[in-house]
Image (cartoon, rainbow, N blue to C red):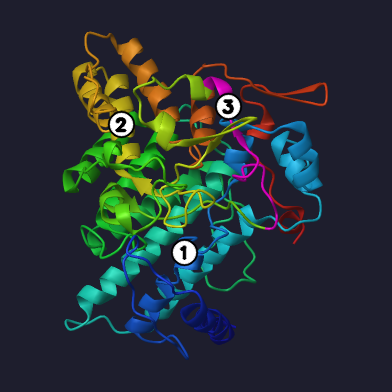
Amino acid sequence: MKKTLFLKVTLCLYGFFFLACDKTEFLNQKPDKALLIPNTLAHFQALLDADDVLNGASQPGNTPQLGESGSDNFYLLEDEFYTNLRPQMQNYYFWSESPYAGISVSDYNYPYEAILYANTVLEGMEKLERNSQNREQYDYIAGQALFHRAHMFYQLAQVFAPPYNPDTENNEPGIFLRKSADINEKLARATVAETYRQIIEDLVQSVPRLNTEPPYKTRPSRQASYALLARTYLAMREYETAKRYADSCLDIQSTLFDFNEVNINNTSPFQGTGFSHAINQEIIFFTAMLSATSQNFPTTFSYSLVDSALYRSYHENDLRKSVFFTPRASGQRFRGSYSFRGRTHYFSGLAVDEVLLTRAECQARLGNVDQALADLNRLLLARWDNRVSFVPLEGLNGQETLSIILEERRKELLYRGLRWTDLRRLNQEGYGITLTRKLNGQVYTLPPNDPRWTWPLPPEVLHR
């Protein structure tokens, strides 16, 4: 079984390396490798460099879009809804209890394909001797595989498992924690607690094995593990621990991209070699969300419109208002993805701006208002028109500071697949956020803590 699986993965990679390895300076160049049977450290590294599978670097992306499709960052016009969306995608938009209608659920399949690659590497390396000559490379490859598996477990948990609640036992059904390359292995569904425990365990084990910074942004690094630990603990509402890992991440490097350097006349402001190096400094780890494909998700650039109230919330001197959005007669469309493929390929990876906002929020919640405001002001300074004097925020109390940070988090991190997780945890804390959509004279709502905040597993998975 395992030999067959190795060959299957290898054949996939053989095609990948020859047909899908057009790198740009944005992600830095990688060596092309053609493999026969993966049984050496070099082979396993090549498996992990299959960035179409592990990072979603090809056009479809690979991290789930279900959360973004269900979020309040955008809306659809009636004509676009009926013309462009298949029934399954229409169900996503209205948070249907039974959303799946005949189309494969890419949000589920793509992450597990990446997990398969990671598990294939981890199992294959068990057959290799770790010795004094290969120890550093061996550990580095194992650390990458552990990170990739944890990353996809995290992504799956945000849509297919209930939110983690630090005040309960978290014994609700979570996701299937596949830790073997045997795709026929029968597994029981892990609890939410077990799901998050595995994510954290993989990440903590990856930290000492990884390089501090990556040779290119599609490879995990120690900084990426710290950033994902901060993101995970934030989702768990463990704010002190999230702050600690955010500190560790930002201690390695905390460069922000100054939006004054963006040419807003570019169709996709962050695409192309002109800004590759600069924006690369802010990106910690690159992945892309499922976006522009033949399936036409609700979030597709060509017809999803940015929430009007969200757009109006940007100050006129906030450069994000012109960098992130492009006007259409019907409204604003989001074009501000940190992706080398442009506006139709939504960045869902890890970046300094997110970690800085995570630390700011944790500082505010922990009562460290001055430190929270310092992080927030540092971000806003890099987003403000430098022709206009930026007035730092100061003199605010804890609740005022937290409210502004949460607002800026939404304004900075839209279309990255993060808003759904934020809404779920905020509603656990009593924010009472109800999502509403209107179409064809009918109103659809998603009240706080409704079961539909967790997307169901595909029927074929449950009925195996």
Secondary structure at numbered mark 2: loop
The amino acid at mark 1 is Leu
The answer to whether residue 119 is visible is yes
Point out which mark residue 383 bears. 2
Point out which mark residue 54 bears. 1
Query: In terms of sequence position, does the residue under pointer 2 or pointer 3 come before the other?
Result: 3
| Dominant SS in magenta | loop
The amino acid at mark 2 is Arg
Query: In terms of sequence position, does the residue under pointer 1 or pointer 3 come before the other?
Result: 1
Per the model, the C-alpha gap separating discs 2 and 3 is 20 Å
Q: Is residue 296 magenta?
A: yes
Vertical side of 147 occupied by 200: above or below:
above
Q: Is residue 311 magenta?
A: no
Give the residue at x 32% y 42%.
262
Secondary structure at numbered mark 3: loop
**Residue receiving disc 3:** 307
Label 3 crowd (10 A; few <14 / some 14-19 / many >=20):
some
Q: Between residues 65 and 336, which one lies in front from this camera angle? A: 336
Residue furthest to the front: 265
The answer to whether residue 97 is visible is no
Give the residue at x 44% y 55%.
287
Q: Quadrant of residue 147?
A: bottom left
The amino acid at mark 3 is Asp
Per the model, the C-alpha gap separating discs 1 and 3 is 31 Å
Vertical side of 7 occupied by 331: above or below:
above
Give the residue at x 55% y 61%.
59
Q: Which residues are magenta?
A: 294-309
